[in-house]
Amino acid sequence: MILVEPSKHEYIERGRIDQPDRSSAPVWAHPIIANGRLYVRDQDVLLCYDVTAK
């Protein structure tokens, strides 16, 4: 998952999270941010990341 800052002039990557044990099957669930946490679902796995500013 990559966080990109919108820009008309250049690609600005602000963060990146590599998902461990990613399946090869398509994933249709949308990522969700709630209460400073990012939730990502891949088949039968739910991952949670703290995305609050440090």
Image (cartoon, rainbow, N blue to C red):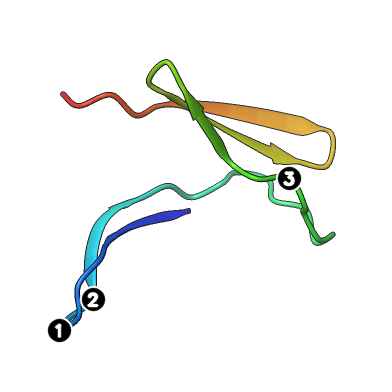
Q: Residue at x 73, y 45 (%)?
A: 29
Q: Which secondary structure, mark 1?
A: loop
Residue 46 drawn at (x, y percent): 69, 29
Q: Which secondary structure, mark 2?
A: loop
Residue on which the image places disc 2: 11
Q: Which secondary structure, mark 3?
A: loop
Residue 8 drawn at (x, y percent): 20, 80
**Marks 1 and 2: CB-CB under 8 Å?**
no
**Marks 3 and 2: CB-CB under 8 Å?**
no
Seen from this angle, which residue lies furthest bottom?
Answer: 9
In space, the residues marked 3 and 2 are separated at their CA atoms by: 26 Å
Residue 19 versus residue 41 in the image, above or below = below
In space, the residues marked 1 and 3 are separated at their CA atoms by: 31 Å
Residue 1 versus residue 9 in the image, above or below = above
Mark 3: few, some, or many residues within 10 Å (few <14, many ≥20)? few
Residue on which the image places disc 1: 9
The C terminus lies in quadrant: top left
Q: Work out whether residue 20 or residue 48 is closer to the camera in this orientation and state it.
A: 48
Mark 2: few, some, or many residues within 10 Å (few <14, many ≥20)? few
Q: Quadrant of residue 27?
A: bottom right
Closer to the observer: label 1 or label 2? Answer: 1
Residue on which the image places disc 3: 29
Q: Residue at x 56, y 46 (%)?
A: 19
Q: Residue at x 61, y 30 (%)?
A: 47
Q: Is residue 1 left or right of residue 16?
A: right
Residue type of the residue flagged with mark 1 = His
Q: Work out whether residue 46 or residue 18 is closer to the camera in this orientation and state it.
A: 46
Q: Residue at x 60, y 44 (%)?
A: 20
Q: Quadrant of residue 12?
A: bottom left
